[in-house]
Amino acid sequence: MACGADGLYSRAMTHTLRYSDARFLQSAQTLPQCPGDTGMEVAFAGRSNAGKSSAINVLTRQSKLARISKTPGRTQLINFFSLDEQLRLVDLPGYGYAKVSRAVKVDWERNLADYLQHRQSLRLLVLVMDIRHPLRDYDWQMLKWASHARLPVHILLTKADKFKRGPAKDTLMAVEREIAQAGLDNITLQTFSALKKTGLDDLEAVLNHWLCD
Ligand code: GDP
């Protein structure tokens, strides 16, 4: 596995990975179509337009990587990117991207829930939210599924550059409070900006922790 000690925070707690090594592996619609359930993976979810692709592109230092997930025909698929033979990043279908029929939506939700609940190699769900519109219906749905599956969640409040530091911090704390009030645990959160690349070190440290333990 491509884990090596590097950096102050990493040395103390965990290891680092080369996210720039990410390569498109395959797409899947259903759990049985997913690549072999070995090794470890971290999945990214978020409403469409929340900033999920931008976050994945900044993390992997590849401006076009997550565009693969946006090509027609792939938007409703689970897209896998490999870091090496054992480690993967997973781009889950965004919600509200296309006007799809109710039947397609039901299918898509079933496949997502199935993946979140039964995927053994899944270590962490990164839930991307626009900091200006956090905790929408879809986000709660994902949080509840993850909680049901006892899956840790890391919330990325992205587009933080849209706020000054004070209001960004206030939103972070408000979201944290709301989650605690809902009785959900196993959730961490941070602010992020793909535009300014702020919060990238924190995101990497969290992923390193879950992918290299
Ligand atoms: P996705 O549908 O969740 O994958 O969202 P995208 O990554 O495609 O982003 C949606 C829109 O938000 C695009 O116009 C991006 O340029 C913009 N965006 C994404 N991240 C940021 C950010 O950190 N700051 C700002 N200001 N805009 C962002």
Image (spheres, helix red, strand yellow):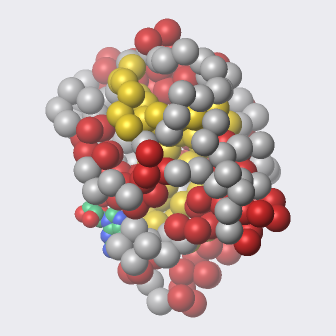
Query: Residue drawn 44% across and 45% down?
Result: 21
Query: Residue drawn 43% across and 52% down?
Result: 20
Residue placed furthest toward the right: 12
Q: Is residue 119 above or below residue 154?
A: above
Question: Percent from the top left, x then y, of residue 155?
Answer: 59, 57
Query: Residue drawn 61% across and 42% down?
Result: 2
Q: Give whichever of 169, 119 is nearer the camera.
A: 119
Q: Is residue 174 visible?
A: no
Quarter for ligand 1?
A: bottom left
Q: Give whichever of 180, 20 is nearer the camera.
A: 20
Q: Is residue 6 above or below residue 38?
A: below
Q: Is residue 112 visible?
A: yes
Question: Percent from the top left, x then y, of residue 144?
Answer: 65, 39
Question: Percent from the top left, x then y, of residue 26?
Answer: 37, 24
In the displayed structure, does residue 180 sit left or right of residue 120? right
In the displayed structure, does residue 170 sit left or right of residue 88? right
Image quarter of residue 12: bottom right
In the displayed structure, does residue 56 sit left or right of residue 97? right
Q: Which corner quadrant holds the C terminus?
A: top right
